[in-house]
Image (cartoon, rainbow, N blue to C red):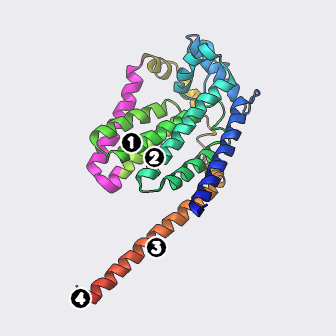
Amino acid sequence: MTMNSLYLLVVAFFALAVAYNHLQIVSHEYPLDYNETGMLVTTATIAHGDNPYSLESQPIRVSLYPVLYNILVAPLSRVFGNTLELHRAVNGLFILGSCAICFYLCRRDSATRTESLTAAVLVYAGLLFYSTPIASINGLGLFLFLSAIAIPWVYGFSTRSLAVSIVFGLLAFYTKQYFIASLGYVALYLFLAESKKRAIYFGLAALAALLSSWRLSPTARRITWRPPYMLSSQVPKKAASDDHLISQVREFVQIYLPLLFILSVAVVCRLYSKALVSERRGSLHRRLGW
């Protein structure tokens, strides 16, 4: 058995172990987070045709997040039952979708299948920590976030791909507020690496689309502009504080420290390789007298 085959076998074993852990999370019959049952309440409210942001729903059925995820799960809950297992399973599908995006992007960037699979499995393991794999909006939000960034990159930041990115960015926003940062990342890349004019146009188009989505949607207009229950419930003072931001960054670094270390080593190796090639090329040119 070659070393590459042994390495692939180890990666496959690790993937199965992670998947088994995920299956245990999905099938656990009791809540794993204090907000899991809140997801069920919001889904049940929508499934019965009620508005979680209406006056009648305050405060017991109010949602702290946008409700796109619950809208997607509501029809399924009428068929399979509004259970924790259903919500976790749907969330798990989007987690796997995010890992598939990771695999595709690595493979497209000239990585081997084994390396791409390794990256996807490591991301999978990371996403099973904390609140992402439970009954929550994080799986769908992350999938839309990654899609909004990946699509323009895959299609060379064409006008059509940027338009699709805006659509996915808005859907990400209506899943979880700060996932709209995906559009900010795309605009920043356009500004730094492509065209400053296109970046400004993209930013203005994204802003116009966001404002239009509020105004054109009867539900969004009702819950956002008249009764401020959506905005008031989704912008708590703690989430807007600097201390909360610092604690979130610290926790992110702790969770993804191994991946950040691997990324740092990869970047250093890539820069060293480019510098070495440039030095050898310069040495060759000097020998040839160019």
Q: Secondary structure at mark 3?
A: helix
Q: Real-space Cα distance between discs 2 and 4? A: 44 Å
| Residue in view at x 42 percent, y 25 percent | 214
State the count of labels.
4
Q: Report the magenta stretch's main SS.
A: helix
Q: Which residue is mark 3?
A: 272
Whole-percent x, y for residue 276 in the image = 41, 77
State which tag comes first along the sequence, 3 or 1: 1
Lower sequence index among marks 3 and 4: 3
**Residue sitting nearer the eye, 26 or 107:** 107
Q: Position of residue 113 (x, y in %)?
A: 49, 52
What residue sits right under mark 2 in the picture? 104
**Of label 1 and label 4, which has the lower sequence position?**
1
Q: Which mark is residue 151?
A: 1
In terms of sequence position, does the residue under pointer 2 or pointer 1 come before the other? Answer: 2
Quarter of the image for the C terminus: give it. Answer: bottom left
As measured in the structure, the alpha-carbon distance from the residue carrying label 3 to the one carrying label 4 is: 25 Å
| Residue type pointed to by label 4 | Gly
User: Which region of the structure is painted magenta?
Assistant: 190-217
